[in-house]
Every structure is written in C-alpha cells, then in structure tokens.
Amino acid sequence: MEQDLNQIDRKTAGFGAAAAAAIVFSTLLAVAKEFFPALKAAMKAASGHHWITHGVVVLALFLILGWLLSKTNLRMSGKRLAWKLVLSTVLGGLGLIILFLFV
C-alpha cells in the first residue's frame, strides 16, 4: 500500500495529536488548580509540589494518549498537525496569560 506523500505516519499523527491535547489539558489543569484550592493541595500532597504532580500527569496523558492514538488509523498531513500544535500552543499560552494577569 503506497502512502500519500502529504500524509504523516500513524505514530507521528498519534503522538502529535496527543501533544496538542496535552497542551490544552495542561492549561485547563492550571486553571482548575487556581479555582479549586483542594485540587492544588492534593497535587502538592502527592509529590511535594503541585507543579511536579502537574508535569507527571500531563506527561502520562501524553504518553498514554499518544500510544493509543498511534494504534489507530489516524491520518493527517504534516501541515494539519503543525496547525493543530500551533493552535493548541497559542490557545494554551493565552489561557495562562489571562489566568495569571486577571485572576
């Protein structure tokens, strides 16, 4: 079966999509920690600092979701994946800027 030259392989697509999801999830988790002190306290208790737990959870999400998505027949072009990553990064960054400037 010949691969379309514009399509990336399923592992790249899966882990790329997982990276975009992890970026958005990380932003949402940061927001949730600020609005729910009990969550922040629980995350601090889990590892000694809430940002350490935050990083471990986001990394686990990326690895698990990337592995699962790479097993599917997820198809996309490299350009589409790049746009997904750029969009998730920009939205995540804006979300954090708004959070820490206005909350």
Image: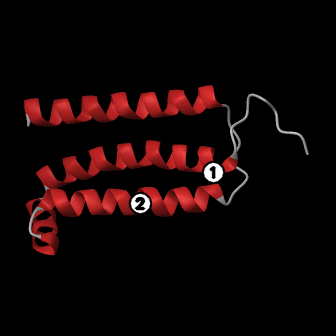
Q: How packed is label 1: few (under 14 Cα within 10 Å), some, or many (20 or more)?
A: some
On the picture, is 79 further left or further right than 51?
A: right
In the image, residue 77 sits, relative to residue 20, either above or below, namely above
Q: Identify the residue shown where x is 31% and y is 36%.
A: 92
Q: Which mark is residue 61?
A: 2
Q: Position of residue 97 (x, y in %)?
A: 18, 30
Q: Which residue is mark 1?
A: 11
Q: How many marks?
A: 2
Left or right: residue 65 compared with residue 37: right
Quarter of the image holding residue 20?
A: top left
The disc labelled 2 sits on which kind of residue? Leu
Q: Is residue 4 left or right of residue 23?
A: right
The span from disc 2 to disc 1 (Cα, nearest Å) is 16 Å
Looking at the rendered image, the disc whose residue lies closer to the viewer, 2 or 1, is 1
**The C terminus lies in quadrant:** top left
In the image, what residue occupies the spot 21% across and 49% down? 30
